[in-house]
Each structure stands twice: as structure tokens, then as C-alpha cells.
Image (cartoon, rainbow, N blue to C red):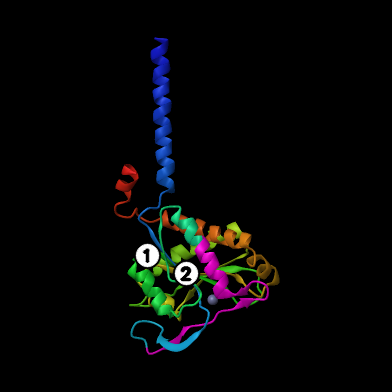
């Protein structure tokens, strides 16, 4: 009798262990989700003009050169490094991550960067930037509501902006300056998938310039963004095929 009872307890503990392991795995598995990372700017600006949205008569330079920090250096190099760190964190969660570029020597208009996110049907496109200026703070841009351009991605973009901004500001300790809609960004107006643009800090703020020059803080920034992206993906329905891949793996 005693042996049967202890065997039952053992079975119960085993089933509980398997159940909890499955729960933890399911919670932590983002297989089937796609995130597009666009590190902002490039080595050389390209001033050739492009329409700010499909069919628009208003144009803007293809891609600007960005700002720089006295210690950290050019924005495009810094955000590319953070983008690669973010890539590494997200792929460990099972997410398919598509980078618009992985080296600084490229020539890609903002509309082309949006097209990368469109082609891979990203659940979220994230454009990484730092702002000019000496303020101590971070904020996230999202597409303003424009009929036929952003009306299909507005709500999800705004939701993602709020979630990522909060997670990033909390994790990095950089003061939260909130979210801001923009109607003039080609990289938003050409996007067919939810898209956000965190301005992760201001590069002429001397203490933030110092911080962002270190690999440790860049990793912290990438982790803060990743936390927000994971929180956002958790609000979405599971991608097709995800459930079966959990069971068979
Ligand atoms: Zn920028």
C-alpha cells in the first residue's frame, strides 16, 4: 500500500514537472513571428528625392546622414551595433529576424527599408535611431493616421510604440518622453506592416553619449527593446503553425 502511494506521488510530481516545463517553453517560444530591424541611416547620406508615400507629390531625401556623439561617434554605426545585438536576443527566442542591412556601407532609401519589412510580412518593423539634441530622455515615433497609407497599420503601430517605449525606458532608466505620431516619414508611409521608430536617447547629452559608447549599455538598450518587442508579440494571435511546432519539438 505504502509503495503504491509513493508511486502515485512520484507520477504526480513527474506530470506536474512536464506540465510546468511545457508552460515555460510555450511562454518563451516565439517561433513563427517575424521582426524586421532597420538600423537608421548609413555611411553616406543620399539626397536624391523620393515620394514620402505611395503616389505622393511631396518628396524627401532618400536617406539622411543622422547625428553623432562626441564620444560614441556616428549614429548609423551605433544603432547598427545595437540592431545586431537585438537580432541576437530575438533569434534566441525563436523569432525570425530580418535585418535591412548588417554593414554600414550600403545605399538604401527609407522606402526600400520599409519594403524589406513588407516583403517578409513582419509582425513588427522597428527602425532604430538616436535623436540630435542634449535632452535626457527617449521617445518612440509611430505613423500618423493617413487614409490609404497608414490606416491599416495605425492601431497596431501605436500599440507597439506604447509597449516598446515603456519597456525600453523602464529597463534602461532613460527618462520616458512618450510616443509621437509622424506623418512625414517615408519609412512609415511606405510600410504595410506595423512600424515604430524609437529615438533611444539624445546623442549630444553628454552622459548618454558616454553611456552609449560602451558595449555594456548598448546591450542594455538592446535588451530593453527586446523586452518591449516580446511584450508586444504576446498581444498578437499565435502565428500559423506555431502550436504544432511546440508539440513536435
Ligand atoms: Zn536618426
Could you tell me residue 228's position as x and y percent? 50, 58
Residue at figure coordinates x 42%, y 43% from the top left: 25
Query: In this view of the protein, which residue sits in the foreground, 159 or 93?
Result: 93
Q: Earlier in the sequence, mark 2 or mark 1?
A: 2
Most extreme residue toward the top, as rendered? 1
Could you tell me residue 204's position as x and y percent? 66, 75
Q: Give the numbered dot on residue 178.
A: none
Is residue 135 shown above or below 170? below
Examine the image and state in which quarter residue 134 appears.
bottom right
Residue at figure coordinates x 38%, y 90% from the top left: 57
Query: In this view of the protein, which residue sits in the foreground, 97 or 149?
Result: 97
Left or right, 69 with respect to 31, comes to right
Query: In this view of the protein, which residue sits in the foreground, 165 or 99?
Result: 99
Left or right, 193 with respect to 39, comes to left
**Residues under numbered marks 2 and 1 in contact, where contact means CB atoms less than 8 Å apart:** no
Residue at figure coordinates x 55%, y 79% from the top left: 66
Question: Looking at the image, in which quadrant does ligand 1 appear?
Answer: bottom right
Examine the image and state in which quarter residue 195 appears.
bottom left
Q: Quadrant of the C terminus?
A: top left
Q: Is residue 75 magenta?
A: yes
Which residues are the magenta region?
Answer: 57-85
Examine the image and state in which quarter residue 237 appears.
bottom left
Is residue 31 visible in this depiction of the protein?
yes
Q: Secondary structure beneath disc 2?
A: loop
Query: In this view of the protein, which residue sits in the foreground, 5 or 179?
Result: 5
Could you tell me residue 212's position as x and y percent? 63, 67
| Whole-number angstrom distance, CA of label 2 to CA of label 1 | 18 Å
Q: Badge 2 is on which residue? A: 102
Amino acid at each position: 500500500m505504502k509503495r503504491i502511494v509513493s508511486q502515485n506521488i512520484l507520477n504526480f510530481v513527474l506530470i506536474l514537472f512536464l506540465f510546468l516545463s511545457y508552460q515555460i517553453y510555450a511562454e518563451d517560444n516565439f517561433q513563427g513571428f517575424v521582426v524586421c530591424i532597420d538600423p537608421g541611416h548609413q555611411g553616406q547620406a543620399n539626397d536624391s528625392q523620393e515620394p514620402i508615400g505611395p503616389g505622393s507629390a511631396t518628396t524627401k531625401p532618400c536617406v539622411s546622414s543622422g547625428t553623432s556623439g562626441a564620444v560614441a561617434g556616428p549614429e548609423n554605426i551605433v544603432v547598427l551595433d545595437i540592431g545586431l545585438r537585438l537580432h541576437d536576443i530575438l533569434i534566441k527566442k525563436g523569432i525570425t529576424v530580418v535585418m535591412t542591412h548588417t554593414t554600414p556601407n550600403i545605399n538604401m532609401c527609407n522606402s526600400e527599408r520599409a519594403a524589406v519589412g513588407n516583403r517578409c510580412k513582419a509582425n513588427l518593423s522597428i527602425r532604430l535611431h538616436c535623436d540630435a539634441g542634449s535632452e535626457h530622455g527617449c521617445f518612440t515615433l509611430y505613423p500618423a493616421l493617413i487614409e490609404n497609407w497608414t490606416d491599416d497599420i495605425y492601431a497596431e503601430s501605436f500599440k507597439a510604440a506604447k509597449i516598446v517605449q515603456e519597456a525600453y525606458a523602464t529597463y534602461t532608466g532613460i527618462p520616458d518622453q512618450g510616443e509621437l505620431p509622424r506623418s512625414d516619414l517615408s519609412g512609415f508611409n511606405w510600410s504595410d506592416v506595423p512600424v515604430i521608430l524609437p529615438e533611444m536617447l539624445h546623442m549630444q547629452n553628454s552622459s548618454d553619449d558616454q553611456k552609449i559608447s560602451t558595449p555594456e549599455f548598448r546591450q542594455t538598450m538592446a535588451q530593453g527593446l527586446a523586452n518591449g518587442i516580446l511584450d508586444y508579440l504576446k498581444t498578437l494571435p499565435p502565428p500559423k503553425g506555431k502550436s504544432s511546432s511546440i508539440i513536435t519539438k
